[in-house]
Image (cartoon, rainbow, N blue to C red):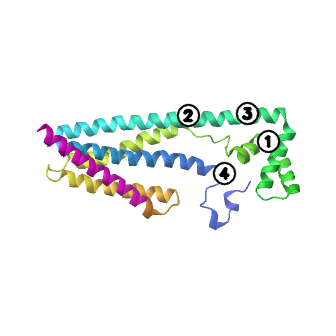
Amino acid sequence: MSTESEIPGAHRNEPHHGDLSGRLNWLRAGVLGANDGIISTAGLVVGVAGATTDRTAVLAAGVAGLVAGALSMAGGEYVSVSTQRDTERAALRKEERELAEMPDAEERELAGIYEDKGLSPELAAQVARELTEKNALLAHADAELQIDPENLTSPWQAAWASFLSFAVGALIPLIAIALPPVGARVWTCIVAVVVGLVLTGAVSARLGDAPAGRAIARNVLVGTLAMVITYYVGVLFGVTVG
């Protein structure tokens, strides 16, 4: 196994040894939570602001949306990732049972996987044999299941990341619409939300090594559309009630 000092300089910043799956787990939950917090809370408070000038009503709706949304995101992530973790554990138990009951067939299966990846039959058989001797379950989990038994997805990690990121994201439109005068609050909220979505888009692109422009444009477009629609729904509701 190569140490960090042995990795060529051009590749030292690339993820290795299962770090990518853990980072993507955090990234997925965190970015989804932040974006959802910004967009859903912005839509909620802007919609209420379109229906009423009562600052207390707008603030109460925003706080309620923050709490409910953060808990909902955390609960949804916990259930979803727990299901994924249970599926991974079940697959590993099945593989462990097959290795105990038919080790020769499993070794041939592993060799076949490496043959399909381009190795010669002789080299594939040698690789399968050596990996099986070292750690058969780990070899099959990696090649056959694409699972790292020592780094399974964490439901608590995803839940906390979603909860905290949603709450932080929701604070942006909540503060932006609560502090300014009534006449400026909607535009202040829109500007703050666009800035927040640009930041989350840029961060997600940076951490995921993806093009920043596409992520930012997608975030801003969805968020702006949500605010425009909910604002005019709020205006319509306010006019109808009035």
* Circle 2 crowding by C-alpha within 10 Å: few under 14, some 14–19, many from 20: some
Q: Nearer the viewer, residue 83 or 239?
A: 239
- Residue with the mark numbered 3: 94
Q: How far is disc 4 from disc 2 in space, using C-alphas? A: 23 Å
- Residue with the mark numbered 1: 136
Relative placement, left or right, of 62 versus 140 is left
Name the mark on residue 82: 2
Secondary structure found at label 4: loop
Residue at image coords 45%, 46%: 30
Residue at image coords 17%, 42%: 51
Q: How far is disc 1 from disc 2 in space, using C-alphas? A: 26 Å
Please report whichever mark, 3 or 4, sits nearer to the chain's N-terminal start.
4
Three-letter code, disc 2: Ser
Relative placement, left or right, of 60 versus 24 is left
> Is there a contact, CB below 8 Å, between mark 3 and mark 4?
no
Relative placement, left or right, of 200 versus 18 is left
- Residue with the mark numbered 4: 17
| Magenta stretch: helix, strand or loop mostly | helix
